[in-house]
Structure formats: structure tokens, C-alpha cells
Amino acid sequence: MSGMNQVLEIDETNLTARVQPGVVTGELHAQLEARGLFYPPDPASAESSTVGGNVAENAGGLRAVKYGVTRDYVLALETVLATGKVIHTGRATMKNVTGYDLTRLLVGSEGTLGIFTEITLKLIPLPPVVGAVLFLFETAEAAAETTVALGRAGLMPRACEFMDKASLDAVAAYTHASLGAEAGAVLLVEVDGSAAAVAGELEIAKEVGAANGAFEDRTASDAEARDELWSVRRSISPALSTLSPGRVNEDVCLPRSELARYLARTRELAEEAGVPVANFGHMGDGNLHVNVLVPAEADEAAMEGVERLVTNLLESAVAMGGTLSGEHGIGTTKQPYLGLEIPPAEMALMRAVKKVFDPAGILNPGKIFPDD
Amino acid sequence: MSGMNQVLEIDETNLTARVQPGVVTGELHAQLEARGLFYPPDPASAESSTVGGNVAENAGGLRAVKYGVTRDYVLALETVLATGKVIHTGRATMKNVTGYDLTRLLVGSEGTLGIFTEITLKLIPLPPVVGAVLFLFETAEAAAETTVALGRAGLMPRACEFMDKASLDAVAAYTHASLGAEAGAVLLVEVDGSAAAVAGELEIAKEVGAANGAFEDRTASDAEARDELWSVRRSISPALSTLSPGRVNEDVCLPRSELARYLARTRELAEEAGVPVANFGHMGDGNLHVNVLVPAEADEAAMEGVERLVTNLLESAVAMGGTLSGEHGIGTTKQPYLGLEIPPAEMALMRAVKKVFDPAGILNPGKIFPDD
């Protein structure tokens, strides 16, 4: 019991898994994939984050562009309420519409409505083949246009990951590797399915990339080559943390049509503030990680500038029809900004729902909602 | 304004649609498909039901087995509360985790929490090719075993529709057509994707069918031939209503592993009650429409027998890990049975959520919850 980290059941007939919340997501992936099963949600933190944490935050990740987010795979929950009472919501069935959907209300509630003790997940068959192509562009805007054009061409890539020049420079300095270092931006597109489907989709992707400004593409057809392409993407977080240990990692999500305009806006705002910004993220679903690279020597005045910059970045995202947070949640760091997106009447409803589940306010107190 | 039945915007760049609730789902499908876009939720009532109704009931339908249900495509809602106040929940972005997920709480709330005035839907690219195969079996159990085996073979059909002998007999009498009339059960499997993917998946499906007792299969590779296969499935509801104008159409959803056992149980219970039962439905996701064919001449005593049979059918589904309702919702007809599935503490939470949204109980009063 101590770590609540057991996979309780993998049901190959019903394509479901029953797990305790402490199971590390990457370990669940490995156990399932060995049996030809697939749990698509794939936060970049999968090797350290847990299924329980992923459900509490409604984690997204790399494969959401085709497969959706954690919410789309949670069938049922066992939850301890603030009273100590244990409730069971949802059913281990593919459809279920009896009463209100308390299960999906609990997903993403950040530990403020209850504590999960068992999670039933929907699985799908593991796609047999995966292929990837890395596109090199002169500009971030060309990468954004390619992302939109892939959708118009009818493609549903399973990942469509973006890195801008500042991110690529940080990775080059950190890894001493040169892949993509000559580009102004890169896009890593991954597709999956049957061998024939993957080959066909990679061809279409390459045509779309070339037509939208990719000056080079590198295709990976085996796992080793894919791993090499992904090494750049995987190095971003440690590279940026090395460059700026106090970096602020934002998590806006935009309509795809606004990506190019938003990226240009982040550069303008960064220049005005005199603080560098690096952009990377899940461009296929419009989810950008805007990293404000706070200088190590920042004094109080400089930190005020950083705070203004963060506010401006979030306000711009909301003004363009986007959201403050695509997948990280609110917690305490985005709490001061929640009102930028959630109007008073909607916030009042959320607070009232919180009171229903936790009248005394003892579950994860002080999270999500700004002080009254 | 009168019918609230306008498609307000189809956004081909962002793959979203903004619609009023009175739009007929089938009309939305047609408008989107003409542009190469796809809104997968496909209730059998698509030609008459509306998007607003589908969202209020979290409608499922024929294509849920691969593509999920209405909830999975609702990004944002404009809703009028009981107070008259208009709220906006969700964002027109692919990911969004700011605050509680009121949007998905409203989906499936059956008009008891608020009234939708605008709905923003997620779209995907239209799969270019669709293929279908109809399997004929001696027994319903063989169809259920084939359904499980398709999943084990790694297939994600976009539809996997079942009809038992009683359903086939009713269709034969109603349409005077003979397709499937010699079978004890049929399964209609539809796949989609690229031409190569469809061809490959149909081959695998036929191998799986043959290995699990299909004594015949009929493949349709063009729209006309598919339409002929579907004509049997489409005729079921009018055929059963002609046979039994007072039929009770249940909507249980089971773990796939329990389908064969549940089908056998329905026949036992029907025999005990002396009332015929016809089973059909979305077998791929375990969602069976169990139709109790109430005789036209049923007197009060006979109707008591029908009610006992319905109770037994629902209790058996819940006992096997299933749910009372996969896609139809509770309304008033399943209200007396809600307690079979939802325990008191969970029901109390739902009632408390209702009070938050509608303290005076003026929205769709008397629906879902049994009287206190």
C-alpha cells in the first residue's frame, strides 16, 4: 500500500487497466506495450510523473494531437472525499451516461475535490508502426504554417513538436550536438498506424513541409533513428534549466490559426522587457511552452519586469482565444492569473462545486482559486 | 433565433465548428463532409436529433467504438443558467485545464443544469476511405466472441454493429428483404482510413470472423454496397416498433468480456417472463439495445411482468460490471432504476451539484433523480 504504486489489472479482453495512483506513467506504458496495448497520454514527464498526478492535472503531452488527453482515457475512479468517505464514479465500460459525470469533474481538479485511490483507464491496441520526420525551417512562422497545412492535408500526426531558435541554441550548447542547430525553427512530426499508412502519411507530410518552407527534412523509419530525432526535443527542459535555473515555464494553448501571430508577439514582448524567451511545445494542438529565461542575477526590479512579461504573455494568449494552461494546471503559480480567463460567474460556480465536495476546505487548500 | 438552428462557423484552419443547439446532427455531418471535415459522433437518430440534444445526453452512436462520444468533441459551451445569467465554459483550443471542467459536467446533464445556446465542437479530417463487411453467424455468442477477437487482433473498427435472430426476423418481416435472414446473428464491421489501411483491416477482420464462427461474409468496398449492408441495421427501429408499438428500448453497456454471458441471460429472463426480447446495438463498445417487445394486448398483470423483466435486465447488467445507460440517459424512464447503479453518497453529490446550478429546481424538473 505504501506507495499506492501497483498496476492492479491489465484486461486484454476489455482493453482496460486498473491502477493505483502512484504508478509511474512510463512504467505503465512499458508494461502495456509489451502486451501490444497502448495508453496514449504521454506527458513529457512520463518517466517521473504518476498516473494519479496525470489524472489530477488532466495531463496532455506529446501524443494529444491525435489521441486526446488523460481525461479521454479515464473510465472510472475510486476517490476519498474530504469526509473520509470513499466514492466510486464511472464504470469500466466504453459508454456510460447515468447521472452527472463526476468522473470527468474529478479529472483535472488538482487534488482539491478528492484523493484518488484507484483509477480505471481505457486502452487501445498498440499501433504497429511509427515513423517520424524532422523539418528544418528558417522561421518559427513557417513551422506554424506547416502545422496548419498538415491538418488541411487531412493528416492526424500523433505528435507535432516545435522548437524555436532560442530552444535549439540552448540544446546545442547543452548537448554539443548539431542536429537542427542551423535552423531557425524545427518541427518533429510523428505518425503511426500500419506500415502502409505510415509510409503514405510520411510522404504527404514531406510534401506539405516542402511546400511551406522546410529547407530540409530528415526521416526516421526505425526506432534508433527516431530516438536520435527525439534527442533534441528531450534535451530542451534540462538545456533551458541549465541556461536559466529560475526559468518560468508557461503553458498556453492557442487556436492553431493564431500560433504564428502569438510567436511573433512573444518575441516583441520579450524584447520590450529585455528578458529572453524560448518557445517550444506541442504545436499540433496549439500548446506552447513559453519559457521566460530569468537571468540568474535578476534583482527585485528585474523580477518585477519578469512578472509584467508573464502577465503580458498570458493576457495575449487569452486575447487571441487561447487559454492560460493547456496541460500544467493552475496550482499556485497561475492562481493570480485565473481571473484573466475565468469570469466571475463561472469562478463562483467552481468555488461552489469545491464547497460541495470539501466544505471545510481541507483538500489541497489554497490551490487553483485566488484568495477571495 | 427562433429555432436556434444555425451553423455559425466552420473553421477549417482550427478544425472547429460553432453551432446553435437546434442544428440537426445529420445536417452538420453533411455540411462538414462536403468540406473534407468530420464530426464523428453519429447517434442512430442523427437525421432528426439535434447537436444540443446530443450534448445534453452525451450521445454515443455507431462510431463511438473508434472515435468516442459527444463529450470527446465538445470544446466550449455558452449556457444559460437557471438565474438567466449566461456563462461561457471551455475554450476553442485542443487542450484547456484552467479550473474545474464545467464544460464536461454540463455535457450529459440532460437540461437539468443549464440550457445551451452555443456549442463549439472539435472536428477532425474526414477519413478518405470507408469499407464494411457483414458477418453471418449461427449464434449471438459467436458475434460477441468475434467482437472481442477484433480488438485482440489490434483492430479499431469505426463501427461494430450487432443484430440477433429476433431483430433479423423483425427486419425480414418489415422489409421483405432477405439479407442476413438465414443467420442466427450478424455483425456489421466498418473500418476507415487510407485505401491501403482499409484494405488491410478488412482482410484482418475477415480472418478474425472466419476463425470465430462466421459462416459467411459480405464485403462492401463502395458507398452503394455499404448502403445495402447498412439497410438491415437502419430498418431495426421501425421494424421493432411495427412489431411492438409499446416496445421498451433499454440501453445497457457492458464490458466486452461479458457480452456473450449477458446475451444468454437476456434470453433466459425473456423466457421466464414469457415476453420476447430482441437485442441489437453497438457491440464494439459493449452497448446493447435490449428491446422488450411488449405485446399490444398486454393487460395490467402482463405489464407488471414487463416491469419485472426490465428490472431484471438492468440488475443483471449492473451485476456484470455494466451500466444502466450507455447513451440514452436517464430522463424519467430510467429514473426508478438509477439507484441500482449510483450509490447514495454519489447520488447525494450529484443532487448537491444540481442545487449549485439550479437552487430552485426549475430546469427540467423531475428528471434524472428519483424523488427523495
Image: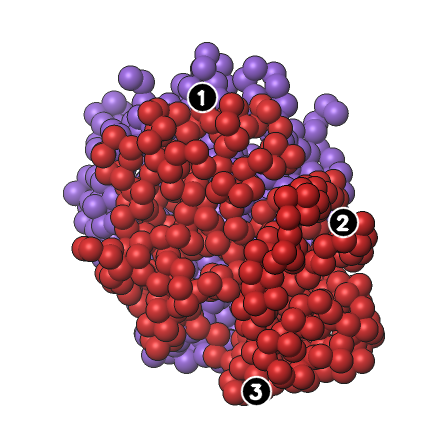
Chain colours: A red, B purple
Residue A129, numbered circle: none
Q: Is residue A137 above or below residue A79?
A: below
Whether residue B154 sits left or right of residue A194 in the image: it is left
Callouts 1 and 3 in the same chain: no
Q: Are marks 1 and 2 on the same chain?
A: no
Q: Earlier in the sequence, mark 3 or mark 2?
A: 3
Disc 2 on helix, strand or loop? helix
- Pair 3/2: label in front: 2
**Cα–Cα span, label 1 and label 3:** 54 Å
The residue to which callout 3 is attached is A225
Residue sitting at 63 percent across and 23 percent down?
B86
Q: Mark 1 belongs to which subunit?
A: B
SS at circle 1: helix
Circle 1 crowding by C-alpha within 10 Å: few under 14, some 14–19, many from 20? some
The N terminus of chain A is located in which quarter?
bottom left
Residue underneath mark 1? B356
The x, y position of residue A369, in whole percent, is: 50, 32
Report which residue position mark 2 lands on.
A273
Q: Amino acid type of disc 3?
A: Ala
Viewer-nearest residue: B256 or A42? A42
Amino acid at pointer 1: Val
The quadrant where residue B78 appears: top right
User: Residue B44's x, y, as percent?
Assistant: 53, 47
- At horizontal 73% and vertical 69% (from top left) the residue drawn is A165
What type is the residue that disc 2 sits on?
A: Ala
**Callout 3–callout 2 Cβ contact below 8 Å:** no
Q: Nearer the viewer, residue B26 or A280?
A: A280
